[in-house]
């Protein structure tokens, strides 16, 4: 599957688009597969999300 650059989002962009707190998004990352749904670029660097990763991240239920 080829992904175009305009289809890739960062955690910050998802936070702004869907109004979900950054801490919540980071905690939901453990439910995704690194290398397929997202890619960490390094310490204190952006996390890149694929379109499928974004869909999974925003559709996860809220923790109680």
Image: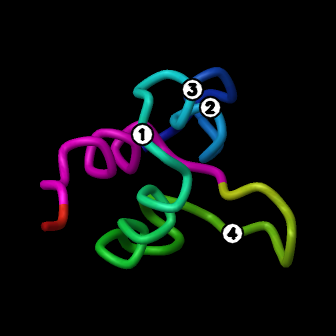
Residue designated by label 3? 16
Within-10-Å neighbours for mark 4: few <14, some 14–19, many 20+:
few
Find the distance from the CA under tag 1 to the CA under tag 3.
Answer: 7 Å
Residue designated by label 2? 13
Please tell me which residue is depicted at 50% across the width and 65% down the height of the picture. 26
Q: What percent of the width, then of the height, locates residue 44?
A: 86, 69
Contact flag, marks 1 and 3 (Cβ < 8 Å): no
Q: Quadrant of the C terminus?
A: bottom left
Find the distance from the CA under tag 2 to the CA under tag 4.
Answer: 15 Å
Q: Can you tell which quarter of the image residue 58 is in?
A: top left
Query: Which range of residues does the magenta coloring cover?
Result: 48-62
Q: Secondary structure at mark 2?
A: helix
Q: Is residue 45 above or below residue 4?
A: below
In the figure, is residue 34 to the left or right of 60? right
Among numbered discs 2 and 4, the one appearing first in the sequence: 2
Please tell me which residue is depicted at 38% across the width and 73% down the height of the picture. 33
Among numbered discs 2 and 1, the one appearing first in the sequence: 2
Residue designated by label 4? 40
Find the distance from the CA under tag 2 to the CA under tag 1.
Answer: 10 Å
Find the distance from the CA under tag 4 to the CA under tag 3.
Answer: 19 Å
Depth-wise, is mark 1 or mark 4 nearer the camera?
A: 1
* Residue 20: numbered disc: 1
């Amino acid at each position: 599957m080829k992904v175009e650059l305009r289809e890739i989002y960062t955690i910050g962009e998802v936070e702004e688009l869907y109004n979900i707190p950054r801490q919540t998004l980071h905690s939901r990352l453990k439910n995704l597969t690194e290398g397929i749904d997202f890619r960490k670029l390094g310490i204190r660097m952006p996390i890149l999300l694929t379109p499928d990763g974004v869909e999974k991240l925003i559709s996860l239920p809220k923790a109680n």
